[in-house]
Amino acid sequence: MNRENFGSKLGAILAAAGSAVGLGNVWRFPIETGQNGGAAFIIIYIMCIITLGLPIMISEFLIGRYTHSNTAGAYRILSDGSPWKWVGRMGVFTGWFILCYYAVVGGWTMHYTFLSLTNAFAGVPATQFGQIFEDFTANPWIPSLWFILFIGITHFIITRGVQSGIERFSKIMMPTLFIITLLLTFCSLSLPGAADGIEFLLKPDWSKVNSTVVLAAVGQAFYSLSLGMGCLCTYASYFDEKTPLAKTATHVAIIDTFIAVMAGFIIFPSMFNIGMNPNEVGAGAGLAFVSLPNVFQQALSGSPLLAILFSTLFYFLLFVAALTSAMSLHEVATAYITEEFNLSRRKGTLIITGTVLILGLLCSLSFGPLSGIQLFGRNIFSLFDDFSGMVLLPLGGMLISIFAGWRLDRQLYRNEISNGGDLRTPYFKALIFSLRYIAPLAIGLVFLDQQGAFNFLKH
Ligand code: PHE
């Protein structure tokens, strides 16, 4: 079958960075950093990226590029008929599964962009923002329509293919995201009180660092780099033989970390400006859709126009970040179904979009009409969110590192990362060591921690 490749190295980096930079960078990293020791957390986070994020990312790149196949095909080719082929299938399933709820949040970012643009937050009392968000998500129509629009845009890009879809749009959207980030950072840093925000984010406090904090850093590094499923493997299957895998992975990790730290520079100065205590704010949707619209409104109340602009750009930034991640999730499933079942891209994309539409609508409606459907005390949306984040991703990550460290042929590994001997690979031994021992152990501990296995230590 004739397969497309990315047309340039830059396109490959931007597409992979687009997958990595997502909601996690904005609504989780800054809060986790601020509350867990500032610069101390950032240092631990960067160490996690180097010791386990990069080895796994390089391995996922390698598996994709070597086989030039969708994720299920890639692991099948490399597993010689053994059950390891299931790791690839699981990676495809995880991508598709995450997309179902991730795209719902993508829709929320569009709605909030629209609300900001139409100045709907002006004059709203601080206590009302929670209610606004609840009313919105409980509405049977509005969030569902935004979700459909969001998945429609993702569909439109994916159906156009690798070069004129994913690559072309990544090349437009990633620089846009970068410029907006810098603009918002600049604006937030010029607010009175900004210094306190920077101090909160950056002041190292090693006394806060304990095993739970380290595990949080591992988990965040992992999620933020889109590891443990099929995204990076699928994108790497479109890399050409000259793409340097370790260097590309390093670039992606640097971009991802940079945007995450900048998000902190956007959020905290404005929070301190209005006297809000970030230690009392939780990460996630509550931060992005309840605390922040209020923060922006109040911090910039002196200039209504600036408030509109700032808030609109912020939600547009979230939208772009979510969209480029959603593209990578969609592509995992689309590449799988088109290649394994010999369908045209048009048909394959349609089938994936159709299935995501159905399940995504269930997720979307689970805050309103379907809120009565609960399992383990969670609504449908949270089931999707938690099952993927707490089970599928850690399990996938652990299996991938064991597969790459113990099962893949060493010669093949070395040959691939050196591009057939062209590049030096002084880090090779350390990389294999991490894949064999450090990564599986660290991810295993995160997994157990998330299941509450260490709760008895926390009292
Ligand atoms: N890395 C994305 C983020 O930071 C989330 C994501 C995870 C996207 C896994 C794709 C796959 O939000």
Image: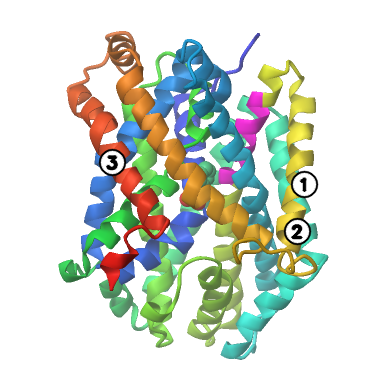
Position above or below: 436 against 228: above
Residue 418: give x, y in percent of width and height: 29, 15
Query: In the rendered structure, which amino acid carries the disc numbered 1?
Result: Leu
Instruction: Say which amino acid is labelled 2.
Output: Trp
Q: Is residue 326 magenta?
A: yes
Q: Mark 3 = which residue?
A: 441
As drawn, the label of residue 146 is 2
Q: CA distance from mark 1 to mark 2?
A: 12 Å
Secondary element at tag 3: helix
Label 1 with label 2: CB-CB less than 8 Å:
no
Q: Which residues are magenta?
A: 324-336
Q: Quadrant of the C terminus?
A: bottom left
Give the residue type that dot 3 points to.
Answer: Leu
Comes first in the chain, label 1 or label 2: 2
Residue pointed to by mark 1: 357
Instruction: Estimate the x, y position of residue 235 in percent, counting from the top left.
Output: 52, 28
**Callout in the foreground (2, 3):** 3
What x and y, as percent, mark residue 43? 22, 55
Identified at 51% across, 65% down, the residue is 284
Please tell me which residue lies in front, 53 or 457: 457
- Extreme residue toward the right, this view: 141
Dot in front, 1 or 3: 3
Secondary structure at badge 1 equals helix
Q: Quadrant of residue 313?
A: bottom right
Residue 424 higher or lower than 351, as above or below = above
